[in-house]
Image (spheres, rainbow, N blue to C red):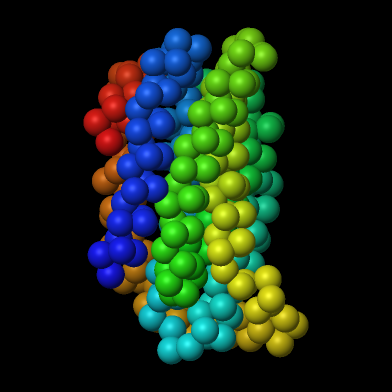
Amino acid sequence: MLFDISRIVSGQFIAQLMLLVSIPFITRHYNPEEFGFFAIFSAIAWILVSFSTGKVESLIITMKNKDKAATLAIGVLTIVLASSLVVSLITGHLLSNIYPDFSSNSSYLSILLGVTILTIGSAQTLKCYATYLGRFSGHGVAAILNSTGVISVSLGYAILFDGDSLFIGLILGQITGHALSFFVFLFYTDIISMTSLKIFNSSFSTVIDQAKKIPILLVTQLASTLSARMSTLIVSVVGGVSSAGLLSMAERIVS
């Protein structure tokens, strides 16, 4: 148990240290307003991820056998994919209405929001499945590669491009980081070999069987997500985008 914990903690420590060291370089290229746009976008994405899955992926570790765990994981991954497509189609207009500053970029921000939900939701689902299988070393590797993707893409975008939509680099960095985490867990698990037409057909019934637990899961997990993300949205409304960016930068340093 202690060895498994050490593998998770060591990876998380290295990942957080990488992010801490990169902050002076990232803040040299991104100003508080750009961080504010990214913080608002990220907060909305994480909240939508909770709604899209109902946090059913948390139940993967409670399944009685590996077939049931894999079936539930595949069902949640399918729901995440469908939710990301729906978000990409309908949120462009909503974003421009709620946050007028997004209006000039709403057309492709809705697509990026859908992709963000897909990468976050998929990575979180496979993370739970990897936990069920006891592949704890994958957690550390995923955390390190996540930080690597965030840092490299964010800095690379800022260096190569310039303009009013520079915060897109931070969004792309987040997407890349979670995509790398997804592929790490894909490598550390057997979800591909477990996927079959039979399991895929039964995945929805497995999700429905767990649906009675969704209200409790969603309330508790959504409360946690809102407590972490709502402050950014509130500050953005009261103090503006730049204030939200300053809050986001401070939270990253403290975390």
| Residue found at x 33% / y 19% | 246
Give me the residue at 25% from left, 65% from top: 2
Q: How many marks?
A: 0
Quadrant containing the N terminus in the rendered view: bottom left
Q: Looking at the picture, does residue 25 appear above or below residue 194?
A: above
On screen, residue 12 versus residue 112, left or right, reads left
Relative depth, front residue between 220 and 96: 220
Q: Quadrant of the C terminus?
A: top left
Towards the viewer: 75 or 146 = 146
Q: Residue at x 29, y 27 (%)?
A: 253
Rendered image quadrant of residue 202: bottom right
The answer to whether residue 5 is visible is yes
Residue drawn where x is 39% and y is 48% of the image: 11
Specify the quadrant of the image occupied by residue 15.
top left
Q: Is residue 238 left or right of residue 66?
A: left
Q: Residue furthest right?
A: 197
